[in-house]
Image (tube, rainbow, N blue to C red):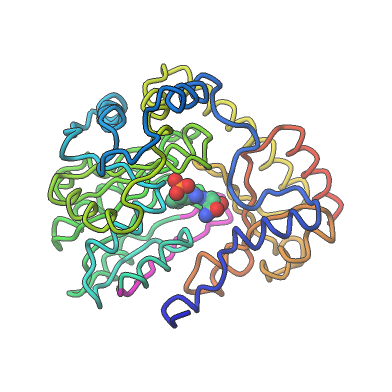
């Protein structure tokens, strides 16, 4: 294994899910729902398989039905117009979209400014592309129970070598949803310094009382923004690995140039099913949100009662907690011992940091699970006190 990759070891999600399997603990680590997405969409996938749609290589950019549905989705929810033929690209999940975007857009030595903590594939993909990451740390505020972006710090992180900003809102793992003012400041900075922005918006529909605002809609941003999303979160089909990119044609072409040599294409029949999913009525999206909001409350309240410091998320399906009120300060050690101690698996936020010390006392729990499962996990966690 080359040195570029060796430093990243095995992804924490594989390690922690294996620990859950080995110990039989409740897995609130890796984020995946314990209930599959809508029956009618599974039926749509079966129909596509039976009818022979997508069983052979689909077109490189994705099947036209899905590209059209993605463009309609951007118009319907955000009023953003994208041409399905030249401005939409289907990928093997958001993961490939992130990798292909970075591989396509970075020259070796280019700097990428990313909000820290960040989703673990960002660091590895920046490294594979020969880039250098420049983290800007979101600051926890125990008083308000939220994380904040210091826009001045972001501004100061941009240098003459900065090629792009890699953004994520709603934000994994903190659950932060960037506000209109924050996004507006980021947009101004990007325009002023002539930067591209790759924005990972996979949790776009998982917001609770907050509004997700796509960066691409801000003045001057459409032409410099690569927006990434995925069916995994919105439709609870993380195993289907259907993701997409929307961007102006030159940027989509660039991302496609990298993507063609990574997977070429993927998920044939599932692409047809997700095209139908994207057209589900508003009621589907509202129900998803309402259901997850109740689960967030159940887990966040339970964790607080169990003695954790809780950052109540405005989006995603993760709660970040502070373990210092429990007399602990090493999230890694805490997560490795947790299955033995009380039969629950969680993720140490330190893995999402370059400044590991900044993330040390924080631990992430997923709440995309049945209410019984969450209630049982809470009752186990209460035994820690
Ligand atoms: N970005 C973020 C922020 C995520 O949390 C995830 C979840 N796995 C991904 C990207 C990857 O999405 P996908 O499963 O569609 O590859
Ligand atoms: N996005 C999910 C998480 O953050 C799953 C990631 C993965 O398994 N690669 O937990």
Residue occupying image coordinates x 59% and y 43%: 32
Q: Is residue 208 visible?
A: yes
Q: For residue 278, what is the image quadrant? A: top left
Residue occupying image coordinates x 39% and y 47%: 92
Membership of 138 in magenta stretch: yes
Residue 29, compared with residue 129, is above or below; it is above
Q: Where does the image place residue 351, in percent across and percent down from the top left?
A: 55, 67
Question: Between residues 287 and 301, which one lies in front from this camera angle?
Answer: 287
Q: Main secondary structure of the magenta part?
A: strand
Residue occupying image coordinates x 66% and y 37%: 369
Residue 139, compared with residue 206, is above or below; it is below
Identify the residue at the far right of this view.
383
Please provide the residue range marked out in magenta: 130-147
Q: Where does the image place residue 122, in percent across and percent down from the top left?
A: 41, 62
Q: Is residue 171 visible?
A: no
Question: Between residues 104 and 349, which one lies in front from this camera angle?
Answer: 104
Q: Where does the image place residue 33, in percent across and percent down from the top left?
A: 61, 38
Direction from residue 196 to residue 364 in the image, left or right: right
Q: Where does the image place residue 354, in percent across and percent down from the top left?
A: 47, 73
Q: For residue 243, what is the image quadrant? A: top left
Instruction: Please state, as top left, top right, bottom left or bottom right, where the C terminus lies in the image.
Output: bottom right
Membership of 68 in magenta stretch: no
Question: Between residues 226 and 49, which one lies in front from this camera angle?
Answer: 49
Identify the residue at the far bottom of this view.
3
């Amino acid at each position: 294994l080359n040195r570029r990759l060796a430093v990243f070891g095995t992804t924490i999600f594989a390690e922690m899910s294996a620990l859950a399997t080995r110990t039989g603990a409740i897995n609130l680590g890796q984020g995946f729902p314990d209930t599959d997405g809508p029956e009618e969409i599974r039926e749509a996938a079966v129909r596509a398989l039976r009818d022979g749609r997508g069983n052979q290589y689909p077109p490189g950019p994705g099947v036209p039905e899905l590209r059209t549905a993605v463009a309609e989705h951007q118009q319907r929810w955000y009023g953003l117009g994208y041409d399905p033929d030249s401005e939409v690209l289907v990928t093997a999940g958001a993961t490939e979209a992130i990798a292909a975007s970075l591989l396509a857009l970075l020259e070796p030595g280019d700097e990428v400014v990313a909000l820290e903590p960040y989703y673990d594939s960002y660091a590895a993909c920046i490294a594979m592309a020969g880039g250098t990451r420049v983290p800007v740390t979101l600051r926890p505020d125990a008083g308000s129970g939220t994380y904040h972006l210091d826009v001045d710090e972001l501004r100061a992180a941009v240098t003459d070598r900065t090629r792009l900003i890699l953004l994520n809102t709603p934000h994994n793992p903190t659950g932060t949803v960037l506000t209109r003012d924050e996004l507006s400041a980021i947009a101004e900075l990007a325009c002023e310094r002539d930067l591209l922005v790759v924005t990972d918006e996979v949790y776009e529909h998982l917001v609770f009382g907050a509004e997700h605002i796509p960066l691409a809609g801000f003045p001057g941003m459409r032409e410099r923004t690569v927006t990434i999303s995925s069916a995994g979160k919105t439709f609870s089909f993380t195993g289907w690995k259907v993701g997409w990119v929307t961007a102006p044609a030159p940027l989509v072409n660039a991302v496609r140039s990298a993507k063609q040599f990574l997977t070429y294409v993927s998920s044939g029949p599932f692409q047809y099913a997700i095209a139908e999913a994207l057209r589900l009525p508003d009621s589907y999206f509202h129900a998803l949100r309402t259901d997850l909001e109740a689960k967030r409350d159940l887990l966040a309240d339970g964790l607080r009662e169990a003695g954790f410091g809780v950052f109540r998320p405005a989006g995603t399906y993760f709660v970040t907690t502070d373990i210092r009120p429990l007399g602990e300060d090493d999230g890694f050690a805490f997560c490795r011992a947790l299955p033995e101690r009380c039969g629950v698996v969680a993720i140490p936020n330190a893995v999402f940091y370059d400044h590991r010390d900044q993330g040390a006392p924080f631990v992430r729990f997923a709440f995309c699970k049945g209410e019984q499962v969450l209630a049982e996990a809470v009752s186990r966690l209460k035994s820690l006190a």
